[in-house]
Image (spheres, rainbow, N blue to C red):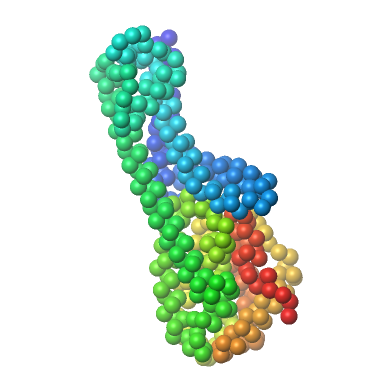
Amino acid sequence: MELIMTLEQCLGAALMLLFLADIFLTILYARAGTGLLAPRWNRAMWAVLHGIANRSGTRRGTILSLAGPIIVVSLIGFWAIGLALGAALIVQPELGTAIRPSNGAASTDFVTSLLVAGNSLSIVGSGDYAPHTTATRLLFLMNSLIGASVLSLVLSYLVQVYASLRERNALALAVDLMSEGSGDAAVMLARLMPDGEGSDATSELGNLIRSLAATKEAHHFYPLLFYFRFEEPLYAVSRFTFILLDVTTLIETALDRRRYSALAKSAQVASIHRGARMLLDTLNSSFPTTGDRADGAAEAWCLRQSYLATTRTLARAGIAVQAEGAEAYIAARQEWETLVRRVAPILGYRMPDIDVRLNAPEP
């Protein structure tokens, strides 16, 4: 009997250490994909919610928009239950002996041990059962310290997650506003270069670099951000990164090389392009993305039409373009658009939500 009780307590201690290690890796170590349990739990919850949403018809977007908050709440509950179960396994063998109520008979069932363990982990720490030996007093003290520390860490983590979410949304909205709400990179580039002048484009793109870098690092530090999906496509990471990558690709391939050489070679353009790619790479490597690659010939034709439509928009804005840049544009865009096609579908967005020129009528 003594051996069984010892094994039960060892199992409880191992369970608590497992959940504490998961909390440490998720909150303090803060690297995407490094948690022991949290990444799997989050993906499982997302799969369940995604499945429910796919069967909900017109309410699909609404349900998916609730996924982020639901996953946050469920993860906190998952950690709390795991720690309580581990503590209960340690406490149960001591019920009725080293841990007992001040008066009356002591219950020794597992539900009572869960109640006692939960009380010892909580800040309040109320309950009829109290420790009566040095070892159990130290156990209760350790549990209370663990409970208070985990609560503080989780609360500060949530504050950082929502602050990062606000900054991500602000970046997405800024990009959308710069395209006049169209989501079209050609319109954004035309507004950045009034009357064909490129000096404003360099300055405005430079202003976006900090927000883009902060958003990239936020997804690396707080992987929960990936699951916050909004009904409006303008807030989608895949959409604003697509626009930024399309803008920089157009600058490098579609604009007149002699007139806009300095802009195409500027650090701002290179940084925006690289930062957007790094953000997509982080999401693609850390989360359950899917493939959605179009047929090669059909894709090349669509991209050529997109390029022609873009150059017409830029020419109307007084921006000098080069007609022979289509091949370079297609090759460059095919290289990064694969990432967009992998990231967008997992959060329930279609490519026409991301690339608005796919919705444009044929000329």
The spot of residue 267 in percent (x, y) is 43, 77
Q: Residue at x 37, y 50 (%)?
A: 159
The residue nearer to you, when weighing 320 against 183, is 183
Is residue 87 left or right of 295 when viewed as pictured?
left
Figure quadrant of the C terminus: bottom right
How many numbered callouts? 0
Q: Residue furthest front?
A: 58
Q: Is residue 69 visible?
A: yes
Above or below, 221 against 108 in this view is: below
Above or below, 316 against 22 in this view is: below
Q: Is residue 8 visible?
A: no
Above or below, 120 against 67 in this view is: above
* Res 328 → quadrant: bottom right
The spot of residue 332 in percent (x, y) is 60, 73
Is residue 40 left or right of 26 when viewed as pictured?
right
* Res 94 → quadrant: top left
The spot of residue 12 in percent (x, y) is 42, 25
Figure quadrant of the N terminus: top left
Q: Residue at x 40, y 20 (%)?
A: 113
The residue nearer to you, when weighing 14 against 91, is 91
Q: Residue at x 41, y 73 (%)?
A: 207
The residue nearer to you, when weighing 30 against 240, is 240
Q: Residue at x 54, y 48 (%)?
A: 67
The spot of residue 237 in percent (x, y) is 53, 61
Is residue 211 left or right of 255 when viewed as pictured?
left
